[in-house]
Amino acid sequence: MPAASDVIVVGSINADLVIRVPRLPRPGETVSGYNFKVFGGGKGANQALAVARLGGKVRLIGNVGTDDFGAMVIKGLASGGVNVSLVEWIPDAHTGVALIMVDESGENAIATAPGANRQWATRGAPYFRNLFQTCHPHTTVILQLEIPLEIVEAVTTAARDYGLRVILNPAPARALEDELLRRADVITPNRHEASELSRRKITDLESAREAARALLDRGVGCVVVTLGGEGAVIATRAGIFHAAPFQVKAVDCTAAGDAFTGGLAVALSEGMDLFSAVKFANACGAIAVTKEGAQPSMPTRAEVEELLRAQSPPIRRI
């Protein structure tokens, strides 16, 4: 396995409270579930753990409250190989919480209370500039949108100024300015996020292709739209391509996109070409949906390599 360069994840850290239900409730309806578990979560923490389990060297920058949930999630991340020395404990805020319902097909509905994830008063642009100027030039920085947008702006600006690779997972969906998108080397939206950013409804592979092209036209270096069981669409200046999916049985789709983004970062940091990196990331996402929970579903390197040996879905121009 090639040596991976450093990965820095700047993002959210949550405790996930998960209820398994026979189906997702309609508005105003109560559905009786049959299982409840608490897991570590938050897109930033999930992606950092994904990188660590795949053999990457990763530091997580984020916030937790000084409560039981904070202690639980930090212990889990550290034991999983994530460097948590840059996580800040916020005394006047609760650790972020996500309430997650998962139905029998693996689909989910999620509501979050960000808590400490919104508290970044002690770390702004100067903090990230000081940090990034000491980083190896091949460092990869991963971000999502569960933290204040001004922090995302500051991180992407500093990372680009020091020549670091930026992977932006624009989740949850929201409108973003072109200037921010241009600072990303790669963005990894799912179909809903790509629809929001491109203002094009994605219903099939062709509409995903057009959405990806529209995002590329906004200045992003590379767009990878994740489509779950339909694989991914890759848009570059050289063309637009479809990466076919791996065939697995979905149990819980929570954090599949986080596994994908973490896997993509590891693959690129190891020097894989883009197509190989997307295939590797697709395998990570596929394995994640076969397990319950967010962080417990993040795959190991051995699991990914086994799936890659067993299946080799094609990538073709579309």
Image (cartoon, rainbow, N blue to C red):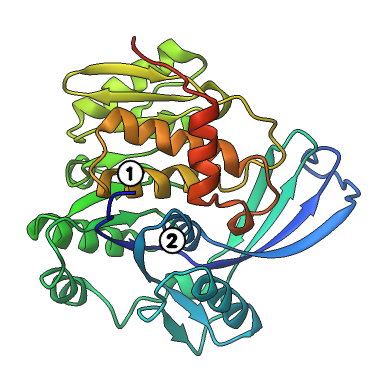
Mark 1: give few (<14), some (14-19) or many (20+) Cα within 10 Å: many
Q: Residues within 10 Å of mark 2 (few under 14, many from 20)?
A: many
Left or right: 211, with 216 as reference point:
right
Tag on residue 267?
1
Expressed as whole percent of the image width and height from the top left, the position of residue 174 reads 41, 44
Q: Quadrant of residue 239?
A: top left
Kind of residue at badge 1: Ala
Q: Quadrant of the C terminus?
A: top left
Q: Is residue 203 visible?
A: yes
Q: What is the x, y in percent for residue 31?
A: 88, 46
- Upstream in sequence: badge 2 or badge 1: 2
* Alpha carbons under labels 2 and 1: distance apart: 12 Å
2 and 1 marks in contact (CB < 8 Å): no
Q: Is residue 302 above or below residue 84?
A: above
For label 1, the SS is helix
The numbered dot on residue 55 is: none
| Residue type, label 2 | Ala
